[in-house]
Image (cartoon, grey):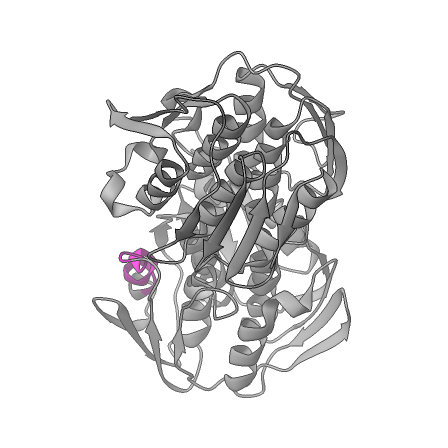
């Protein structure tokens, strides 16, 4: 497997262009299944999850055209869907495969989708998707690691759905199911993430009738059919946030372009509280400078517009270099501190108790060999490696390849001493 090798202590300076948002590209690609007409998508990030999604759509007999692979532009034409299945072998590395469930139920009235990663259904909010589809008239069984769903008569029916907890993929899935359903669907306690709004905007271009985007209540009036469209995916706010921390933690200065600062309000505010100077240059550009003095600041992860759980590991890396104590409270996921033990091995002073992580700094980190446990943990370890003395080796970087386009090249372009070391597949 590939590894990253980082020699810490370099000050980062220069310009970084942000790629399209993985978490927006995945649902809009799935939404292309809702029409037989051509859908053209731009600004798709060149990351592993999007390659997997394109293979999944092709498996279902959608025509997926690109000029290169990995690609930033896709043309998808789902004239007929002959295989309404997302098989485990194809999607075992990508939880977003469940996003094909809503479009398949709306368009074809049946679907067989692998439970993402073979996970127990109770441990993830996938059950919220299924309950909502059942309210819309679907019959659903889960067996042998698969969700098997069908609409026994006609089309899905509009329903009044109140999510027990906020679920981004659940909101997206039911949005896509509802646009072709009979009658009106009301979604309450819906996710407000920019990626959801991006999907709503694309569906609107396809002829869907949706109101309330950007709020927690969405109203969808079903239509008989949708048509093709052309859509450009929003910038990746988590990648932008990661580079904000990279500039701050190394004491450098980065100009971050092709981003949307308004999607990063909570992150920018918290970094400011920690002493990081950030300037909003214009609607698509930010400048971050290394703080003269980083100070500890508490943070609690929340659904949008709160501080994103996907920025928690990166913030923890920053907190190791701040004076004083930072208390990090993780409210979204139960087990998202796996990176903490690796940072401790590098010399960080971190204690974890349930959903709280307490970081005391500043700590002199030293390079060692660490393992990435998930996508965002990988980013946190890269940031820690940038400020550690000596050499840090990060193993299992296939996680980071799922969500960050060219992170090694982008970091090298602004002065980081980082390289990818190719290893044998395992």
Judging depth in this view, the residue of 425 and 81 nearest the camera is 81
Q: Where residue 223 sits in the image (x, y, percent)?
A: 63, 35
Q: Quadrant of the C terminus?
A: top left
Q: In the image, what residue occupies the spot 24% across and 22% down?
A: 144
Magenta span: predominant SS is helix
Along the horizontal axis of the image, is 152 left or right of 252? left
Q: Quadrant of the N terminus?
A: top left
Along the horizontal axis of the image, is 108 left or right of 114? right
Say whether residue 404 is visible: no
The image shows residue 159, relative to residue 54, as above or below, that is below
Place residue 39 in its image quadrant: top right
Based on the picture, tell me whether residue 339 belongs to the magenta stretch: yes
Q: Residue furthest top?
A: 82
Q: How many marks?
A: 0
The image shows residue 391, relative to residue 250, as above or below, that is above
Judging depth in this view, the residue of 413 and 137 nearest the camera is 137
Based on the picture, tell me whether residue 250 belongs to the magenta stretch: no
Q: Where residue 248 sits in the image (x, y, percent)?
A: 58, 74
Bounds of the magenta span? 334-343
Q: Where residue 241 sits in the image (x, y, percent)?
A: 57, 64
Judging depth in this view, the residue of 352 and 425 nearest the camera is 352
């Amino acid at each position: 497997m590939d590894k990253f090798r980082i020699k810490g202590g370099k000050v980062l300076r220069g310009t970084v262009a942000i790629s399209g948002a993985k978490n927006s590209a995945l649902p809009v690609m799935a939404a292309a299944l809702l029409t037989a007409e051509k859908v053209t998508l731009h600004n798709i990030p060149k990351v592993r999850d999007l390659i997997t999604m394109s293979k999944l759509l092709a498996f279902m007999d959608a025509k997926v055209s690109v000029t290169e692979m990995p690609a930033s532009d896709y043309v998808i034409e789902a004239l007929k869907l002959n295989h309404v299945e997302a098989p485990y072998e194809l999607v075992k590395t990508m939880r977003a495969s469940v996003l094909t469930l809503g479009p398949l139920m709306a368009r074809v009235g049946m679907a067989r989708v692998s439970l993402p990663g073979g996970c127990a259904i109770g441990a993830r909010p996938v059950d919220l998707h299924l309950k909502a589809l059942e309210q819309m008239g679907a019959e659903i069984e889960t067996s042998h690691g698969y969700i098997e769903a069908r609409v026994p008569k006609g089309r899905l029916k509009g329903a009044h759905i109140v999510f027990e907890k906020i679920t981004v993929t659940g909101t997206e899935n039911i949005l896509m199911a509802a646009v072709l359903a009979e009658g009106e669907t009301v979604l309450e306690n819906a996710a407000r993430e920019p990626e959801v709004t991006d999907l709503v905007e694309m569906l609107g271009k396809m002829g869907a009738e949706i109101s309330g985007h950007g709020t927690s209540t969405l109203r969808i009036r079903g239509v008989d059919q949708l048509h093709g469209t052309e859509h450009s995916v929003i910038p990746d706010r988590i990648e932008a946030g990661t580079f904000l921390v990279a500039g701050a933690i190394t004491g450098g200065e980065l100009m971050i372009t092709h981003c949307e600062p308004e999607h990063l309000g909570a992150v920018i505010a918290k970094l400011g509280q920690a002493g990081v100077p950030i300037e909003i240059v214009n609607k698509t550009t930010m400048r971050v400078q290394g703080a003269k003095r980083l100070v500890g600041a508490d943070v609690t992860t929340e659904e949008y517009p709160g501080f994103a759980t996907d920025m928690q590991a990166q913030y923890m890396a920053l907190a190791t270099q701040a004076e004083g104590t930072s208390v990090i409270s993780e409210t979204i996921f139960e087990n998202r501190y796996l990176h903490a033990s690796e940072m401790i091995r590098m010399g960080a002073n971190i204690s974890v108790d349930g959903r709280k992580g307490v970081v005391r700094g500043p700590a002199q980190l030293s390079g060692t060999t660490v393992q990435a446990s998930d996508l965002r943990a990988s980013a946190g370890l890269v940031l820690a490696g940038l400020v550690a003395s000596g050499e840090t080796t990060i193993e299992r970087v296939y996680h980071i390849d799922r969500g960050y386009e060219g992170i090694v090249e982008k970091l090298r372009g602004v002065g980081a001493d980082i390289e990818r070391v190719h290893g044998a597949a395992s």
